[in-house]
């Protein structure tokens, strides 16, 4: 038999189904879990060991170490997570990703068609979102195992091809061939789960020996870091360091694995002979042992590893957005004055995050192409804004009113107003970013004059936001009067920009349909942000005069 005799169309179709099954199952699991996954990442990663647990569990749930790593780097890029925090999650993702190989090792392909039928039937006739998510999980799970059956019929025949037999024997004699094979295949597919699933089939059909398979698992761990590298491109120093850390950790793990190659091989042969482990499960257990062992060996040195990464990727890390709501607990502040001081400090922090997100939105708007990672960062910061607004509101509304003077009660009311207006500025900023995304995705653009008009409004907004807090802090009437003037100027900028826009449309100077459509909406959102800045100053004036 030759390579030409193999039914490659059947294999490619099966591979396509396999990849689709992984994506569909992962999407269903992510949707079913909802935003809680990101909340847990954000809340329970103050220490590396917590990140390790979260990374393991999250990856086991969403069935994708690449997705977990990309989310983690998104947090790092947005300044919401330190390198040490990301290290725990990234290492945990390596352990969590072994669950896919374990599921494949269960060899439940006999029920695959029934899972597809039940899931598809449910998708047709159920309307509840959670039920549809479960149905997608079932369909994805079934397709994943059905595709293994489709591919195995083709791959089993490779064992009869002399050239492939020679390659398999080379892998057995030279472990580095299998290692590089795992790296290349996983980089190409951007999924270690998929590449390991294929090698499980090769091994089960007898096309390759077990000693040739183990280095392939090591290579898959290195190859999967391509996702982290791609996610960090164009990012800040912190994001690049997180990607380099992911790669460095997996390279260290591979070195350890290659040193322990034959002891691990002997151990697995012993376990197989003693407990009758099936071929696919044999690889799954090997994968788990390798990643757990690597974690046990390297994790105690995580601080040293991070210090090493900072040396090989030099540079100043950007200011990290330290969103700590633990301090906002009314039970810790029986004295209202102390509580109000903490609330004010949190409001200043909220203002800084809102300001940073406005800046990022303007940069994204002016970008020549669609920077999806930057848009994701903007959305991550918006999540931080909502989180801090909720914490401040909950803190202030739960303070004991029995110990409040009238002045303190007025301050609580004022701070609630300030928090809500800041949160609304954050929402409107996201609106502008999403309008910009529509323009980018359509490969559209604004005219130079339109960009200039938008940037002028952003500049006025920055000034108004800073001066609103100046007045909140100092209660200087001159600051208040300047803000009122700035609001009038912003309204005028919006009016003139809108008028100029319609003139350009009449003259056919605006050639892009999407840009022409959303421009007025962007102007409206920017003008409304100015209103909220002015509201902060007005509420301060009313409460204090």
Image (cartoon, rainbow, N blue to C red):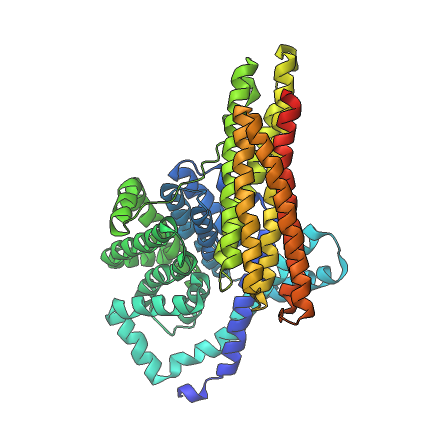
How many numbered marks have been drawn onto this rendered protein structure?
Answer: 0
- Quadrant of residue 444 in the image? bottom right
Location of residue 12 with respect to 477 vertically, above or below: below
Location of residue 234 with respect to 419 vertically, above or below: below
- Quadrant of residue 460 in the image? top right
The quarter of the image holding the C terminus is top right
Location of residue 159 with respect to 175 vertically, above or below: below
531 on left or right of 205:
right
240 on left or right of 261:
right
As rendered, which of 509 and 235 lies closer to the eye? 509
The quarter of the image holding the N terminus is bottom left
Residue 136 is at least partly visible in this image:
yes
Query: x%, y% of residue 503?
Result: 67, 64
As rendered, which of 530 and 246 lies closer to the eye? 530
Q: Residue at x 55, y 59 (%)?
A: 451
Location of residue 363 with respect to 321 vertically, above or below: below
- Quadrant of residue 271 in the image? bottom left
Query: x%, y% of residue 237?
Result: 35, 50
Residue 380 is at least partly visible in this image:
no
83 on left or right of 170:
right
324 on left or right of 461:
left
Query: x%, y% of residue 167?
Result: 31, 77
Q: Residue at x 26, y 67 (%)?
A: 175
Q: Residue at x 54, y 53 (%)?
A: 455
Query: x%, y% of residue 447?
Result: 57, 65
């Amino acid at each position: 038999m030759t390579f030409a005799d193999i039914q490659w169309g059947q294999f490619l179709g099966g591979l396509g189904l396999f990849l689709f099954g992984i994506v569909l199952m992962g999407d269903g699991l992510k949707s079913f879990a909802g935003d809680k996954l990101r909340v847990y990442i954000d809340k329970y990663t103050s220490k590396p060991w917590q990140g390790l647990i979260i990374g393991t569990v999250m990856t086991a749930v969403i069935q994708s170490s690449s997705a977990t790593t990309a989310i983690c780097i998104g947090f790092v890029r947005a300044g919401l997570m330190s390198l040490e925090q990301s290290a725990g999650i990234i290492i945990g993702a390596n352990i969590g990703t072994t669950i896919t190989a374990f599921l494949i090792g269960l060899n439940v392909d006999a029920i695959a068609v029934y899972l597809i039928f039940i899931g598809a039937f449910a998708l047709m006739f159920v309307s509840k979102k959670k039920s549809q998510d479960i149905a997608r999980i079932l369909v994805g799970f079934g397709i994943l195992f059905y595709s293994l059956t489709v591919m195995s019929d083709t791959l089993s025949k490779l064992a009869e091809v002399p050239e492939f037999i020679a390659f398999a024997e080379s892998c057995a004699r030279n472990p580095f061939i299998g290692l590089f094979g795992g790296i290349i295949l996983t980089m190409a597919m951007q999924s270690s789960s998929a590449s390991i699933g294929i090698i499980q089939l090769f091994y089960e059909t007898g096309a390759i020996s077990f000693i040739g398979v183990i280095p392939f698992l090591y290579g898959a761990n290195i190859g999967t870091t391509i996702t982290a590298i791609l996610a960090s491109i164009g990012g800040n120093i912190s994001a690049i360091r997180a990607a380099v850390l992911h790669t460095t950790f997996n390279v260290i793990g591979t070195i350890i694995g290659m040193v322990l190659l034959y002891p691990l091989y002997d151990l697995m042969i012993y376990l197989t002979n003693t407990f009758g482990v099936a071929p696919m499960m044999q690889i799954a257990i090997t994968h788990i042992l390798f990643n757990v062992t690597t974690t046990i060996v390297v994790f105690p040195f995580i601080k040293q590893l991070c210090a090493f990464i900072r040396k090989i990727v030099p540079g100043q890390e950007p200011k990290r957005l330290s969103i700590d709501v633990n301090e906002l607990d009314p039970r810790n502040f029986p004295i209202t004055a102390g509580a109000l001081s903490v609330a004010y400090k949190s409001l200043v922090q909220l203002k800084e995050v809102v300001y940073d997100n406005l800046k990022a939105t303007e940069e994204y708007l002016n970008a020549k192409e669609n920077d999806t990672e930057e848009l994701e960062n903007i959305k991550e910061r918006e999540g931080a804004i909502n989180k801090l607004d909720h914490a401040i509101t909950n803190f202030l509304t739960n303070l004991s009113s029995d110990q409040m003077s009238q002045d303190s009660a007025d301050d609580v009311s004022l701070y609630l107003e300030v928090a809500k207006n800041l949160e609304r500025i954050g929402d409107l900023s996201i609106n502008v970013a999403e309008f910009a995304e529509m323009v980018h995705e359509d490969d559209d653009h604004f005219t130079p004059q339109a960009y200039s008009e938008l940037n002028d409004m952003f500049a006025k907004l920055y000034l108004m936001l800073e001066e609103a807090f100046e007045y909140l802090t100092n209660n200087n009437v001159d600051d208040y009067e300047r803000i009122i003037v700035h609001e009038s100027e912003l309204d005028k900028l919006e009016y003139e920009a809108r008028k100029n826009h319609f003139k350009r449309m009449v003259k056919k100077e605006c050639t892009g349909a999407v840009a022409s459509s959303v421009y007025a909406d962007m102007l409206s959102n920017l003008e409304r942000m100015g209103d909220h800045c002015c509201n902060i100053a007005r509420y301060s004036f009313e409460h204090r005069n």
